Amino acid sequence: MPNDIPIARISPADIYADLRDRICLLDIPPGAVLREAELAAQYGVSRTPVREAIQQVASLGLVESRNGVGTIVTEPDPVLIRQAYEMRLKVAELIGAMAPNGIDAEHLAEMEAHTARAQELTNRFDVTTFLAINHEVHFLIARIIGNVALREMWDRLYFQTARAWYTTARELGAPIAEDFVRELDATLDAMRRGDATAVGYIQRNYIAYAIRHVCD
């Protein structure tokens, strides 16, 4: 079962999140065909919640319907990727300005765990682990954003650019590990100070770092 979701509790939102994450993390690559009947069997549900979930994934531009073929995972569009990255730079600047949520002990413990795992990558790089940590850090930062509209935009732009960055990360390999650790160390230090504004600007700096590798 994808992501080990308990069958009795699977909802369209669960299926959406699972498909979205698998596409973002390249477990489902561009060009793959999503077949409702097969997915319904995998998740143990009818085709209706699968169809609803696919529609949500399509709203992010990650899949599209093609006549005679079905639902296809899209190829990242370089122009749209750059535009989304440019928006991410601006959104990051607002993280500490628009009623941020308090940074609590749970946030700190999670970031400490992510930083420790990332440190291990500098000795033995594993791209799957790198992608997973980066993905979870995104959601951790999102929980600091108190403004709902801003958080939704932060998520949407991340999902639209994740595949491009993760494809590049696979190509770059081990050299990105030390930069990643520096990002997480700086973020953890800012979180310990309760400084959401600094967290946002650290994110902005590393989004700019990703742009240089993905778009230039």
Image: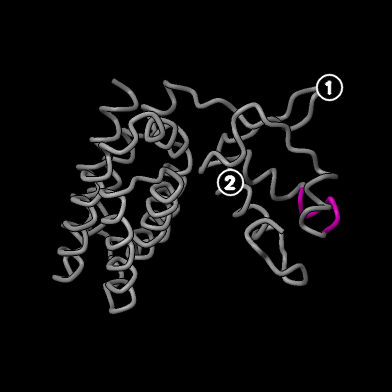
Q: What residue sits 27% from the left and 39% below the top?
A: 176
Helix, strand or loop status at disc 2: helix
In which quarter of the view is residue 101 placed?
Answer: bottom left
Q: What residue sits 42% from the left and 42% below the top?
A: 157
* Camera-side residue of 39 and 141: 39
* Camera-side residue of 205 and 153: 205
Q: Position of residue 110 (x, y in %)?
A: 34, 69
What is the magenta range?
A: 45-50
Q: Amino acid at mark 1?
A: Gly
Q: Residues at badges 1 and 2 in contact (C-beta under 8 Å)?
A: no
Q: Which color scheme does this rendered protein use? A: one colour
| Residue annotated with mark 2 | 22
Q: Is residue 130 above or below residue 169?
A: below
Whether residue 48 is in magenta: the answer is: yes
Q: Amino acid at mark 2?
A: Arg
Whether residue 184 is in magenta: the answer is: no
The numbered mark at residue 68 is 1
> Dot 1, how many residues are within 10 Å of its Cα: few (below 14), some (14-19), or many (20+)?
few
Q: Nearer the viewer, mark 1 or mark 2?
A: 2
- Quadrant where the N terminus is found in the figure: bottom right
How far apart in space, not on screen, are marks 1 and 2 (Cα)? Answer: 24 Å
Q: Of the residues under marks 1 and 2, which one precedes in the sequence?
A: 2
Q: Residue furthest front?
A: 124
Q: What residue sits 23% from the left and 52% below the top?
A: 181
